Image (cartoon, rainbow, N blue to C red):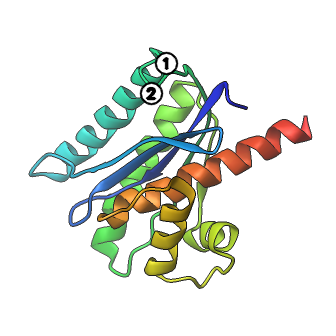
Amino acid sequence: MTNYLCIGVDPGYKSSATGIALVSGGVLLDSFSRHLAGEYPGQRIRSFRDLIESLIRDVRNGVYGLDKIGMLVWEEPHARFINAFRGLAYLESILYLVCEDLLIPYTPVNNKTIKKALCGSGGAGKMGLLAAAERLSNKLFMDQDEADAVVCAFYAERVFKGRLNDE
């Protein structure tokens, strides 16, 4: 398992940032959040694609010490307003395309599923998810987007380990 790196992504569109986290062997290797560049929706979508492709290229070039990606998990987009959902759906489409093009195992996961697996309850609030991210990574987070990506990465590692055990 330690030969593989798992990636968690919390897509962010306009008002929030995109969170990224990398985990291997139960250890957080790196995490960050970044606002997408661009004034227009197409520019933000391109910025997101470039960010994900650059991250995958860095992993495959051994920047994080490992060059194999076991699983990429992202939090499925949800939004109360249709305009926000459209932008998030575009970003999710980019994740599907990049993972398919670059042969990266992936799965989108509902927020409640992640919460149930890592917090014990699908109804855990933002503070519960933040606490789970801090407990799993031994790191304090000031940014919810980064913390969401961290729990996605730890969830990715669980899914990946489960797939290895099934083989």
Total numbered labels placed on residues in the image: 2
Mark 2 neighbour density, 10 Å: few (under 14) some (14–19) many (20 or more): many
Residue drawn 52% across the image and 24% down it: 102
Horizontally, residue 72 falls left or right of residue 38, namely right
The residue that disc 2 covers is 56
Residues tagged 2 and 1 counted as in contact (Cβ below 8 A): yes
Determine the secondary structure under disc 2.
helix
Coordinates of residue 115 in the picture (x, y in percent) = 60, 72
Q: Is residue 12 positioned above or below 38 on the image?
A: below
Residue type marked 2: Ile
Q: Which mark is residue 60?
A: 1
Q: Is residue 3 left or right of residue 27?
A: right
Amino acid type, label 1: Arg
Above or below for 167 versus 12: above
Looking at the picture, does residue 1 appear above or below residue 22? above
Classify 165 as above or below 58: below
Mark 1: few/some/many CA within 10 Å (<14, 14-19, 20+): some
Q: Looking at the image, which residue is at 53% across and 58% down?
A: 151
- Residue placed most toward the observer, 99 or 133: 133
Q: Quadrant of residue 56?
A: top left
